C-alpha cells in the first residue's frame, strides 16, 4: 500500500537513511547495535546483517539487511523481540518503529512495553541495500489508462524505460527482492537476535511475508499476527477484481457516511455525483494544483489522477496524524477544495531521487506476480472489467499501477503465486475488516483455508488494517494480547468497529 509519511520522526529517519545505508553490515549471525545518530530519538538503536543476494548461492554475493530496535519499556516483564512489517510492499519498518520512538503512539502501547520492537527494512528498501531507478523515467508524463493503441504503446514504452533504468541502477538485486527472499532474510534476523522463536506482526503486504515464512519455517514461530490479509494464491484477474470492488465499496460507504454525518463538509450533497463530475471536468480540462509549486507533485490534475489518488485518502476512516492521513474528513475537505478549483490534494507524486517511491514496491510486485498485460487488447479487457465492477473508480487504485508498471519489467518472475502448505505451526492470528479498501475481506478467508492453525478475527467496519486504531479498539487490543500471551480470540469472532 502507498504510505504518506510526514511525521517529524519519520522525516528525520528518512533523511538519515542515505548515510546509514552506506555503512558496512555485520556478517550474518552477529548484530552490532549502535545509536542511530543525533537526529533520531536516543532510544532507537540501529543494526545490520549481511545476507545472501541469492539464497541458491549462499556463499556468493551478499546484500545488507538494515533494521532498528526500540527496546521494551518494561524490561522486567519483557517478552522478547517483535519484528514488524508495516506493509507496502516497500514499507520501511525502520520508519514505523521510528515514529513510535519519536512519541507518535502508532502501535498499541502494550507492544512497546512488553517487546523490543524491531523495524526490519526488507531488501531493496530504506536501511537495507536499496532499489534504485531513474526519477526522470518515472516522471515522464503518460496516461495509465490508454484508450488508443498509440497511447498504449506510449505506456508500454514508459514501463520498459522505467524497468530498464531500475536494472541499470540497481544491478542483480532487482531480480531478488521477491517476498520469499525477504522471508529468508527474516529468518536470518530471527537467528541473529538469538532469542528463540519468532514474534511477528505483519500488516497488508506483511501478511504475505508472514504466510511465506510460516510455510518455510512453521516450527520457528512463537506468535504471528497478520492484519489486513493478502492471499498470494489467487489469479491476477481475481486480485484485480477483488481490489477494484473493495475500493469502490469504500467510496460508496464514504458517500453514505457523508449523508448521515452533519460534520462532513459535503453533508447534504450527492457525493458520488460530485466525485464523477470532478473526474469528468478534470479529464476535459485538468485542474490546477498550486501547492505543487513548492512540492514534488504534478502541477495539474486529471480525472485519472483523482481516481488513482483518492484511494490513498480513503485508506483509513479515522485521521492518523502520525502518518499524515486525514481520514474521511480529510478526503471530504480535499473534494471541496477540488470543487473550488484547487486539485492539489489529488496531484500525482513526482520522484525526486533514485531511492524514491514507488520504486521498491513496484520492483517487489513485478517479481511476485506474473505479467498480465502484454497487448492493447489485454489492457482494454481490464479497463472494461474495472468500469463494469466499479462505475465511479473504474479499476483505479494500487493494483492498476502494478498491472501497468510491470508489463515490460526486465527481470523474470521469482516468487510465483501458489497455495501455501503449512504443517506444524502454532496458532496464527488472521485479522480482516469487512470493508477494507485495500485488502478485500474475502482474502482473509482464502488464507484461513490454507493455514490449518489459523484463527480468524473479523472487525466489522471500515479502513485498512486494525493495528493503528488505538488501545480502545477491541480488535487492536486482541492483536496485542495474542502477541504477548499467545491467547487468541474464539475462532471466527466478529468485533464491532
Image (cartoon, grey):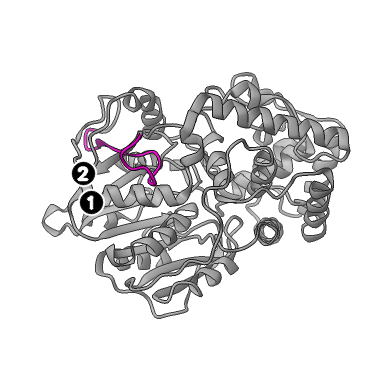
Question: For residue 29, which numbered disc appears in the image?
Answer: 2
The spot of residue 33 in percent (x, y) is 19, 36
Please give the name of the residue rendered at 63% of the width and 51% of the height, measured from the top-left corner.
370
Q: Is residue 298 above or below residue 216?
A: above
The spot of residue 228 in percent (x, y) is 50, 60
Q: According to the image, label 1 marks what residue?
A: 191
Q: Is residue 350 above or below residue 469?
A: above
The spot of residue 52 in percent (x, y) is 34, 40
Depth check, front residue: 355 or 181 = 181
Q: Is residue 413 above or below residue 23?
A: below
Determine which quarter of the picture holds residue 389.
bottom right
Question: For residue 236, which numbered disc appears in the image?
Answer: none
* In-image side of 282 versus 160 (left or right): right
Dot 2 falls on a residue whose secondary structure is loop
Residue extent of the magenta highlight: 42-60
Along the polypeptide, which appears first: circle 2 or circle 1? 2
Q: Are marks 2 and 1 in contact (CB under 8 Å)?
A: yes
* In-image side of 482 versus 448 (left or right): left
The reply to whether residue 151 is visible in this rendering is yes
Please give the name of the residue rendered at 44% of the width and 68% of the height, measured from the top-left corner.
430
Number of other residues with Cα within 10 Å of mark 1, as a class: few under 14, some 14 to 19, many 20 or more? some
Residue 314 colored in magenta in the image: no
Please give the name of the residue rendered at 66% of the width and 33% of the height, measured from the top-left corner.
348
Number of other residues with Cα within 10 Å of mark 2, as a class: few under 14, some 14 to 19, many 20 or more? some
Depth check, front residue: 354 or 267 = 354
Q: CA distance from mark 2 to mark 1?
A: 7 Å
Amino acid at each position: 500500500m502507498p504510505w504518506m509519511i510526514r511525521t517529524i520522526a519519520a522525516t528525520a529517519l528518512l533523511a538519515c537513511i542515505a548515510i546509514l545505508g552506506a555503512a558496512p553490515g555485520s556478517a550474518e549471525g552477529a548484530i552490532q547495535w549502535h545509536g542511530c545518530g543525533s537526529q533520531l530519538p536516543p532510544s532507537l538503536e540501529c543494526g545490520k546483517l549481511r545476507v545472501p543476494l541469492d539464497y541458491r548461492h549462499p556463499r556468493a554475493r551478499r546484500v545488507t539487511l538494515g533494521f532498528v530496535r526500540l527496546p521494551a519499556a518494561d524490561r522486567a516483564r519483557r517478552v522478547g523481540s517483535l519484528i514488524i512489517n508495516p506493509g507496502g510492499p516497500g514499507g520501511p519498518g525502520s520508519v514505523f518503529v521510528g515514529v513510535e520512538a519519536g512519541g507518535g503512539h502508532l502501535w498499541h502501547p502494550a507492544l512497546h512495553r512488553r517487546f523490543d520492537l524491531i523495524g526490519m527494512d526488507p531488501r531493496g528498501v530504506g536501511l537495507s541495500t536499496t532499489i534504485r531507478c531513474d526519477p526522470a523515467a518515472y516522471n515522464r508524463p503518460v496516461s495509465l489508462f490508454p484508450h488508443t493503441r498509440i497511447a498504449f504503446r506510449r505506456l508500454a514504452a514508459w514501463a520498459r524505460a522505467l524497468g530498464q533504468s531500475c536494472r541499470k541502477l540497481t544491478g542483480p538485486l532487482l531480480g531478488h527482492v521477491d517476498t520469499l527472499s525477504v522471508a529468508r532474510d527474516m529468518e536470518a534476523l530471527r537467528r541473529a537476535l538469538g532469542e528463540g522463536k519468532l514474534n511477528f506482526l505483519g500488516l497488508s503486504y506483511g501478511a504475505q511475508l508472514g504466510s511465506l515464512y510460516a510455510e518455510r519455517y512453521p516450527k520457528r514461530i512463537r506468535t504471528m499476527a497478520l492484519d489486513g490479509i493478502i492471499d498470494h494464491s489467487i489469479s491476477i484477474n481475481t486480485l484485480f477484481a477483488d481490489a477494484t470492488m473493495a475500493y469502490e465499496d469504500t467510496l460508496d460507504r464514504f458517500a453514505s457516511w457523508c449523508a448521515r454525518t452533519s460534520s462532513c463538509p459535503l453533508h447534504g450533497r450527492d457525493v458520488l455525483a460530485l466525485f464523477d463530475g470532478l473526474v469528468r471536468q478534470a479529464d476535459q480540462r485538468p485542474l490546477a494544483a498550486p501547492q505543487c509549486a513548492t512540492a514534488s507533485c504534478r502541477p495539474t490534475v486529471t480525472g485519472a489522477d483523482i481516481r488513482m489518488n483518492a484511494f490513498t485518502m480513503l485508506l483509513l476512516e479515522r485521521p492518523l496524524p502520525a502518518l499524515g492521513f486525514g481520514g474521511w474528513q480529510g478526503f471530504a475537505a480535499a473534494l471541496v477544495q477540488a470543487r473550488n478549483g484547487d486539485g492539489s490534494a489529488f496531484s500525482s507524486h513526482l520522484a525526486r531521487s533514485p531511492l524514491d517511491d514507488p520504486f521498491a514496491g513496484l520492483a517487489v510486485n513485478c517479481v511476485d506476480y506474473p505479467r498480465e498485460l502484454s497487448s492493447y487488447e489485454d489492457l482494454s479487457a481490464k479497463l472494461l472489467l474495472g468500469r463494469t465492477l466499479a462505475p465511479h473508480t473504474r479499476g483505479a487504485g494500487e493494483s492498476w499501477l502494478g498491472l501497468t508498471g510491470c508489463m515490460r519489467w526486465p527481470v523474470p518472475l521469482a516468487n510465483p503465486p501458489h497455495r501455501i502448505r503449512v504443517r506444524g505451526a502454532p496458532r496464527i492470528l488472521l485479522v480482516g475488516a469487512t470493508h477494507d479498501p485495500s485488502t478485500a475481506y474475502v482474502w482473509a478467508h482464502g488464507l484461513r483455508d490454507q493455514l490449518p492453525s489459523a484463527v480468524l478475527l473479523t472487525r466489522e467496519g471500515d479502513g485498512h488494517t486494525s493495528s493503528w486504531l488505538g488501545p480502545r479498539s477491541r480488535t487492536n487490543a486482541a492483536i496485542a494480547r495474542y502477541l504477548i500471551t499467545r491467547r487468541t480470540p474464539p475462532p471466527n469472532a466478529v468485533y464491532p468497529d
